[in-house]
Amino acid sequence: MKHPEKKFIKKYYKIKETDNLTNEEFTKKINQNLIGFFFVMLICFFLGFGVGGGNFLSKRIKNGDLKFEKYGQTLTFNSGEKKEIYLVNTNSLYYFYVVKGQKTVEISPISTIQSITKNK
């Protein structure tokens, strides 16, 4: 840092006017602030992508713009019933999907699904 003695720098990094910090201590204080700033920016980045991606997918579902031909899959249940779906996401217990022609997301437990095949 070029001018650690400046008032606005001390105010920004919350250093008291009476504190006489060595150059190493001052650098350590700056690095602590930068690490915190980096983590906040990282959290905002991923949160922004999650919210933005969810809004984009929601609009595509409402408008019926999902590409079933390119990204669609056929879901076969244990009962033998088949549905042409657009797979939104999965986790360890459930599949989240949109059935072709509908505008709602359905949720099915993994245990009720026999197979998923990709449409060609």
Image: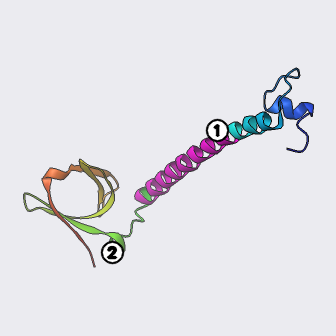
Asked if the residue under mark 2 is in contact with the one under mark 1, i.e. CB atoms within 8 Å, the reply is no
**Residue 25, how many percent across, how many down?**
77, 33
How many numbered discs?
Answer: 2
The image position of residue 95, as x and y in percent, is 26, 53
Q: Which mark is residue 36?
A: 1
| Residue 54 versus residue 22 in the image, above or below | below
Which residue is found at the position 71% from the left and 41% from the top? 31
Density class for disc 1 (Cα within 10 Å; few <14, some 14-19, many ≥20) is few
Q: Which residue is located at x 74 percent, y 34 percent?
A: 29
Q: Earlier in the sequence, mark 1 or mark 2?
A: 1
Identity, as a three-letter code, of the amino acid under mark 1: Gly
Residue occupying image coordinates x 40% and y 58% = 61
Relative vertical location of residue 21 with respect to residue 70 in this rendering, above or below? above
**Residue farthest toward the bottom in the current orientation of the protein:** 120
Reply yes or no: does residue 47 show up in magenta.
yes
Name the quadrant of the C terminus.
bottom left
Element at label 2: helix
The amino acid type, in three-letter code, at marker 2 is Glu
> Is 99 positioned to the left or the right of 39 in the image?
left
Q: Going by the image, does 57 lie left or right of 17?
A: left
On the image, the x and y values in percent for residue 77 come to 13, 59
- In the picture, which quadrant includes the N terminus? top right
Q: Which tag is nearer the camera, tag 1 or tag 2? A: 1
Report the magenta residues as a range. 34-61
> As drawn, is 65 to the left or to the right of 31?
left
Calculate the distance from the C-alpha at mark 1 to the C-alpha at mark 2: 45 Å
The quadrant holding residue 23 is top right
Q: Which residue is mark 2?
A: 69
